[in-house]
Amino acid sequence: MTNRKLEVLTPQNCQIIFIDQQPQMAFGVQSIDRQVLKNNVVALAKAAKVFNIPTVLTTVETESFSGNTFPELLDVFPGQDILERTSMNSWDDQKVRDALAANGKKKVVVSGLWTEVCNNTFALCAMLEGDYEIYMVADASGGTTKEAHDYAMQRMIQAGVIPVTWQQVMLEWQRDWAHKDTYTAVMDIAKEHSGAYGIGVDYAYTMVHKAPSRQKSEHRTLAPVPAKVR
């Protein structure tokens, strides 16, 4: 029997769900720097958009507690429906189950807050009751403490969840740099969101390959003028 977990993620075999990427949920995150978290979530979303990955956005108690989804995330998916819930477990909302089923992909990439609650319960239930494979994006999710995040990840891994990171997922979707239809967009995401790797790409493009600098505004570089030394 083929082990489906040995299959790499492709744009054709998976879907993605963003769970409760909302400010009040982010306020409670202590397992990862919150600005890094937001960067990673938006980068993952942009990658999903590039590869046309079917996407589900779900929120909990927006008006009464959690606040609106990160606007940077929503702007990646203009016009996308947001599936509001009362339950901490997304699987308990029929709209979410229906959306996942309609996408028709058994591999589900998950980015959510908090790891130990909303991600954990969704993952376990979706695997048990929906026969889904869960790929938990560890650095685009966060818990209320490092221990809460880490032990939730361990519990899910023991249950069969596959841990991944956002850049790993993007590059798994790309797979081959010869895929030129997505190459430029992937590199744009890397340059904007991938930290030292992105800085290195910028350096290589401009200094080695002599590409123009990617800023959109015009600037003059004034030549050095040595001051008189007393």
Image (cartoon, helix red, strand yellow):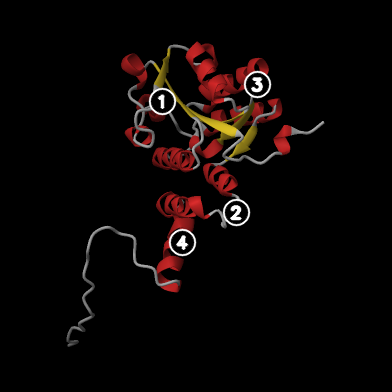
User: How far is disc 3 from disc 4 in space, using C-alphas?
Assistant: 38 Å
Residue in the image at 46% along x and 61% along y: 201
Labels 3 and 2: the sequence-earlier one: 3
Towards the viewer: 166 or 205: 205
| Residue type pointed to by label 1 | Met
- Whether 174 is drawn above or below 127: the answer is below
Could you say which disc has been placed on residue 127 in the image? Answer: 3
User: How far is disc 2 from disc 1 in space, using C-alphas?
Assistant: 36 Å
Q: Secondary structure at mark 4?
A: helix
Q: How many marks?
A: 4
| Residue type pointed to by label 3 | Met
Could you say which disc has been placed on residue 201 in the image? Answer: 4
Towards the viewer: 52 or 223: 52
Find the residue positioned furthest to the front: 181
User: How far is disc 3 from disc 2 in space, using C-alphas?
Assistant: 30 Å
Q: Secondary structure at mark 2?
A: loop
Q: Is residue 71 left or right of residue 48?
A: left
Labels 2 and 1: the sequence-earlier one: 1
| Residue type pointed to by label 2 | Asp
Could you say which disc has been placed on residue 101 in the image? Answer: none
Residue 130: image x %, image y %?
64, 18
Q: Which residue is mark 2?
A: 176
